[in-house]
Structures are given as C-alpha cells and as structure tokens.
Image (tube, rainbow, N blue to C red):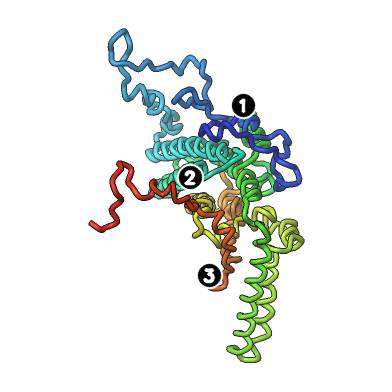
C-alpha cells in the first residue's frame, strides 16, 4: 500500500531512500522507504475523484454503493440522508445507563462528544496523510509546499475546534458524570487508536510516551494498525529530511554557519560591553556567567559536536543540517524563496501547539471530573495526562528557534549572487520585455491609481 497521490507532480517523483544514520531515534530505518513504496497502515484510496474510507471494506454488505442520477433510467436520486448515512450515524448512540434501566441524561452528551472527536480524528488523519505524501516527493517546489501549508492550516483549525468542543463537555458537572461513570469500565479514551495514530504520524516516538503499556489496552486489530504506523516515516521524519536537503546553506563561498557565528560573536560582544558599563560591579559576575551559558546554546548552530551532545541529552531532536536550514529560513524569511517555507515551519509549530493545548484542556477537564482518581481504562487519570502535555511535543525544536534569533540590525546580508538565486523574478532580455509592457489582453499596462 502507498500514501495517497496528491498531485501529478508529486506522483512523478520518487524520493530517495532514508539512510539509517540520518533518521531520528525511533524512526523507521527501512532503506527502501520512498514515495512509491512507503507503506501506510490505513491509507486513503483514491478512484477518480472519489476517496473511499480507509477503515471500511469495499465488499462490506452494509456499505451499498449509491447510484447517482436524475431519476431517469432507473437511477435513484441521491438523497441527503442516504449520502451521509444518517440512519447509521444517528443510531450509533446507545447509552448503557438507558439499557440498564437507569437512564442518565448526560451520558448521551458524553457519547456524542466522543463520537464527534473520533470523526474529527479521522479527518485529521486524512489530511495528515496527504501532507506526508507531499513531503515524500523528491522535488518539493512552491506548489507542493503551498498545498502542504493549506492542508496543515486545515489541521490547525480542526484542532482549534476540538479545543472549543471541550467547553461543551465541561457543562456536565462531576456529579452528573459519576451517575454513569461506573458503566464505562474498562472502556477509556486511553484506547482511542485513532488518536494514537495521529500522534505517531505526526512524530511521537515510543520513547516519548509516558506510559509504555498503552498499546496493550488496544484490541489486537488496532495494535497491529498502530505497530505498522510506527514503522513508517512520520511527518517529523519527512520535514527533517526536507530541511536537511534545502539548498543555499552553502553557495559559492557563502556558508550560513560561518556567517551566523560572526554575527552572534558581534552580538555577544555588544551585550558583554553593556553589562560591563551599565551594571554595578556586584551584579556583573552573575550576568557574565549567564551570558557565557547562553553562548553555548548558540554554538550548537555552527559546532556539530555541541549539537550532537544536545541530541544525546534529549534537549534537541532535529539533525544538525536540518536545524541550520530551519534557522536560516526563519532569519531570512523575507526572501521570496523562503517565504512559503517559513510559513510552513510556523504552521507545524501551530499544529503542535494546538494539539498540546488539547492535551492540557483534557487534563484539566479530567481533574475537574474525577480529581486524582485512576481512569476507567486503568491509566493514572489526571496525573498521566498532565505528564503528556510537554513530553509528547513533536516540533519543539522549531518552536525553540526564537532562542537562536538575532536582531535584524546585526543580521549579515546575503551575498548578491545568492540573493539573485533566491528571487522569483529574474532578469529578462530586452527582446522579451513585451510580456511586461502590455497587459494580458494586449492593452498597455496602466500604472495610475483609480
């Protein structure tokens, strides 16, 4: 099985294989991984303009094909409820308390909220797989980056909606929840395999998990799906590889790391002089020591050994080249060639942040409902959820780039030969100037204001 084809340009290119030495710890090291053969445990299948559900069998007897027509020739007109299968969706709520003869009004809300979450998780996975497919391409130009950015923006907005949806669930009081909580054992949101898939495909690794036994709470079928997903390159892996191979870090004598080192040396010298001239002698020692420690963080940009030490101590995850490229994109994001990549990197941070906000809101809601009790699925409840808030961020390296920024006044200008290569508009010979002198309809271009 392969990732969904999202663009004809993407489908014509096969990405180079992952090299084990270049992958992050915990990532797939399958040397045959490429755009054409990267497996997906639950891929989205496309047929023409149709997308079939990745979790349903095409031959399932309860999934009839809807005939679409105008009513002539024996074709049944497509009906709204049939198209959305509302007979199945609206009859999928069966509160256990009602069946037990002790109906609890709020159990219906509890079920609908969680079913809605699962539907949105399905859409998030659908969108995320297309972003991964874009980044699986060998040549990722502006068109594909724009597509990936568009899909990531949708993912962010869905996550915002999921955060807002939490407020509806909070209209239920702890006492109302306790009325039916005993009926839920041992089922738990801890067993949401779609949420686990979402985390894995974003880039959460086994070693990032707070509870290593979480997978045992899933059904055998869902365990298989999740284990397969763990063997595939995640969005983080694709982003890291894309950044690692971005050009312009070194170009005709220009070296970004050396240029950056020169700039921060100047910046720190200015700060050192400020400390020596503006602070009292008693305060200078502590500030100079802090300045020295801060400099070591900046050194990781141009000293590979410092960067590798940060990886060993799990203070950084992204590779040396990828980190350097992401910083260059961020510092020079006003350059035409870097504008889309910079927005793409920021959107990755936004998605990570929204998912983390959801984790935090979920943790707070659980604490409000059950305090420090264990969850219905055997997890540690609020204590477990609280620990996942910061430990399972995926793109924290990108979020932390602000630590490494320098003031624009100290930012070294790019060499003119490099700036020319990074522009969308290049010089045009005189005989070809007509395309700029007349409008699309042959009219003279009018530069006046209305």
Q: Contact, CB < 8 Å: mark 1 with mark 2? A: no
Check the image and name the residue furthest to the bottom: 281
Of marks 3 and 1, the one in the foreground: 3
Residue 305, image x, y percentages: 76, 61
| Rendering quarter of residue 193 | top right
Does residue 86 sit above or below 22 in this rendering?
above
Does residue 269 sit above or below 355 in this rendering?
below
Cα separation between marks 3 and 2: 27 Å
Of marks 1 and 2, the one in the foreground: 2
In percent of the image, x 52 and y 23: which residue is there? 56
Residue 76, image x, y percentages: 32, 13
- The mark found on residue 408 in the picture is 3
- The mark found on residue 1 in the picture is 1
In percent of the image, x 28 and y 53: which residue is there? 446
Determine the secondary structure under disc 1: loop
Q: Contact, CB < 8 Å: mark 3 with mark 2? A: no
User: Is 104 left, or right, of 287 in this rendering?
Assistant: left
Question: As rendered, which of 266 and 298 lies closer to the eye?
Answer: 266
In percent of the image, x 57 and y 42: which residue is there? 140
Residue 289, image x, y percentages: 69, 79
Q: Is residue 116 visible?
A: yes
């Amino acid at each position: 099985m392969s990732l969904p084809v999202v663009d004809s340009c993407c489908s014509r290119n096969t990405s180079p294989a992952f090299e084990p030495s270049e992958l992050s710890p915990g990532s797939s090291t399958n040397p045959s991984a490429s755009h054409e053969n990267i497996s997906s445990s639950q891929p989205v299948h496309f047929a023409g303009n149709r997308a079939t559900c990745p979790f349903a069998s095409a031959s399932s007897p309860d999934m009839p094909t809807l005939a679409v027509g105008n009513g002539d020739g024996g074709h049944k007109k497509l009906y709204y409820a049939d198209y959305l299968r509302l007979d199945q969706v609206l009859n999928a709520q069966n509160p256990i308390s009602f069946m037990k003869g002790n109906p609890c009004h709020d159990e219906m809300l509890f079920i609908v909220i969680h079913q809605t979450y699962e539907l949105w998780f399905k859409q998030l996975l659908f969108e995320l797989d297309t972003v991964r497919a874009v980044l699986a391409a060998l040549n990722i130009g502006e068109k594909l980056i724009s597509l990936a950015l568009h899909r990531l923006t949708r993912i962010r907005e869905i996550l915002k909606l999921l955060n807002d949806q939490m407020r509806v669930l909070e209209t239920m009081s702890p006492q109302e929840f306790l009325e039916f909580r005993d009926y839920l054992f041992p089922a738990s949101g801890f067993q949401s395999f779609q949420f686990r898939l979402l985390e894995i495909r974003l880039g959460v690794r086994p070693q990032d998990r707070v509870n290593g036994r979480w997978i045992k709470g899933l059904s055998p079928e869902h365990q298989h799906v999740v284990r397969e997903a763990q063997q595939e390159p995640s969005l983080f892996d694709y982003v890291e590889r894309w950044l690692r191979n971005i050009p312009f870090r070194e170009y005709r004598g220009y070296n970004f790391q050396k240029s950056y080192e020169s700039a921060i040396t100047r910046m720190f010298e200015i700060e050192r002089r400020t400390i020596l001239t503006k602070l009292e002698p008693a305060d200078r020692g502590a500030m100079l020591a802090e300045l020295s420690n801060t400099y070591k963080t900046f050194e990781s940009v141009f000293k590979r050994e410092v960067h590798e030490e940060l990886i060993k101590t799990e203070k950084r995850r992204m590779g040396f080249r990828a980190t350097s490229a992401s910083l260059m994109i961020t510092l020079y994001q006003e350059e035409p060639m870097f504008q889309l990549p910079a927005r793409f990197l920021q959107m990755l941070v936004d998605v990570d942040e929204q998912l983390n906000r959801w984790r935090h809101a979920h943790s707070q809601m659980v604490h409000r409902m059950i305090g420090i009790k264990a969850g219905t699925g055997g997890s540690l409840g609020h204590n477990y959820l609280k620990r996942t808030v910061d430990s399972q961020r995926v793109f924290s390296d990108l979020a932390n780039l602000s630590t490494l920024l320098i003031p624009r006044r100290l930012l070294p200008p790019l060499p003119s030969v490099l700036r020319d290569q990074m522009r969308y508009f290049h010089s045009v010979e005189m005989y070809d100037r007509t395309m700029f002198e007349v409008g699309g309809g042959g009219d003279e271009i009018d530069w006046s204001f209305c």
